[in-house]
Image (tube, coloured by chain):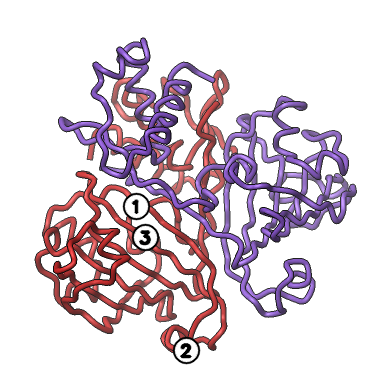
Chain colours: A purple, B red
Amino acid sequence: MLKYEKIALLIEESIVENNLNHGSRLPNFKELIETYHVSKSTIVKALDLLEKRGIIYQIQGSGVFVRRKKRKGYINFSENQGFTADLGEFDITSKVLELSEVIPPLEVREHLSLDDKESVYYVKRIRYINSQVLCIEESYYNKTIIPYLNVEIAEHSIFDYCKTALKLNISFSDKYIHVIKLNKDESDLLELKEGDPGLLIDELFYLSSGEAFDFSKTIYHYVNSQFFLQSTKIYS
Amino acid sequence: MLKYEKIALLIEESIVENNLNHGSRLPNFKELIETYHVSKSTIVKALDLLEKRGIIYQIQGSGVFVRRKKRKGYINFSENQGFTADLGEFDITSKVLELSEVIPPLEVREHLSLDDKESVYYVKRIRYINSQVLCIEESYYNKTIIPYLNVEIAEHSIFDYCKTALKLNISFSDKYIHVIKLNKDESDLLELKEGDPGLLIDELFYLSSGEAFDFSKTIYHYVNSQFFLQSTKIYS
């Protein structure tokens, strides 16, 4: 973690600890520099990062202010740290329904840029939030990048394993989002009725090298999941 | 629009015009500087903006590459330019069901920081994409910020009116996303059946001053709408 990222985390922690509401003004630059014993440019970078993350907003000539805190229990749509990071306050567990090596369907081959004889790890899991069904997830992992996977790993966070054991740098993702009616199999797994609503997310995850290594189809329980997203204007 | 934003748009246009796919390499810094006749720092800023927007990714020491293009017809979840900007290739129209001045419910007063006697503009619209129902939208506009609104304006883009006529700088928003079952009224308006799925988005829009000026509840037609979101790792 870079220095300005550390400072950003410290500032965020102080917002949470002091229970600051939307619109609260943060200390000015001079005070932040003195508090954290860093240069002005580090503070500028830290604040830019916090603005990008939706934690604060800056008004030129006026100051730095706290943005509305997200409602508790909402999954953050815009960061791809995985649930374990998003829903840290909850108990997230997984039941592995299947873990196998398969030749994936065409759609997956295209997403992961595989040739038609290349096998992948296929993992199907039910994920729980505080013992309630959160989602069913089917993931396909490029074996060139994830050469080994087992049930024990898949029962916990596969992304943690990618980061810590395989030293992979998971960097960005593309999400395609649809609302669907559940079929019989899906509704059974989610403990709902056939025809009930579900949120389907196709997500393709990339390493910082630009290589796609994981394509996942996740269907969320429409009552037990809720999402949060902070958006920012891109062009002035 | 700032200079680096203009350059970013030009680079994006060249990616679209040349139909570059995911993984295509862009010209190097030197070539970009020569092509656009700008300084290196302008190119750096333009590329950072394009990376933030999910148009490119940069690999240190290796170059700048095109990110997968979004599927056509998907609403971009992470930018809040309004449909008219997102779905520019489609014909977006609106039917105004109601436009009135009301004392809003408590939830809205809290979101817009209004006292309990303050009235707002309430607008209920059905929005269409190529003549198909896209969503129903109920919006509450702070009258201190939007002092005048009429049906003619609401039949088109209210945000365009805010930007061009009222010179407002719409800057960021918070979205809260749920999947629901439609009630009778909602399903009638969406031309669906009671109990069919819907995507409900509560969204609070802010000006660059940090003031919240619009709270909207939008319910999307589950077949006629689809969403796209590019996410980026925040901390290294």
Chain hosting mark 2: B
Q: Mark 3 Cα within 10 Å, few/some/many (few <14, many 20+)?
A: many
Q: Could you say which quadrant of the image residue A44 lies in?
A: top left
Left or right: residue A147 versus residue B177 is right
Front-most of residues B21 and A151? A151
* Residue beneath disc 1: B173
Q: Of marks 1 and 2, which one's residue comes earlier in the chain?
A: 1
Determine the residue positioned at 32% across, 48% down.
B172
Q: CA distance from mark 1 to mark 2?
A: 29 Å
* Residue beneath disc 2: B184
Q: Amino acid at mark 2?
A: Lys
Residue B190 picture location, percent across and down: 45, 83
Q: CA distance from mark 3 to mark 2?
A: 23 Å
Residue A7 picture location, percent across and down: 43, 21
Q: CA distance from mark 3 to mark 1?
A: 7 Å
Whether callout 1 and callout 2 share a subunit is answered: yes
Q: Of marks 3 and 2, which one's residue comes earlier in the chain?
A: 2
Does residue B22 appear in this view?
Answer: no
Q: Could you say which quadrant of the image residue A167 lies in?
A: top right
Q: Secondary structure at mark 3?
A: strand
Q: Of marks 3 and 1, which one's residue comes earlier in the chain?
A: 1
* Residue beneath disc 3: B203
In this view, B172 is above or below B203: above
Q: Amino acid at mark 3?
A: Glu
Q: Amino acid at mark 1?
A: Ser
In this view, A31 is above or below A109: above
Q: Mark 1 Cα within 10 Å, few/some/many (few <14, many 20+)?
A: many
Determine the residue positioned at 39% across, 46% down.
A69
Q: Secondary structure at mark 1?
A: strand
Does residue A10 appear in this view?
Answer: yes
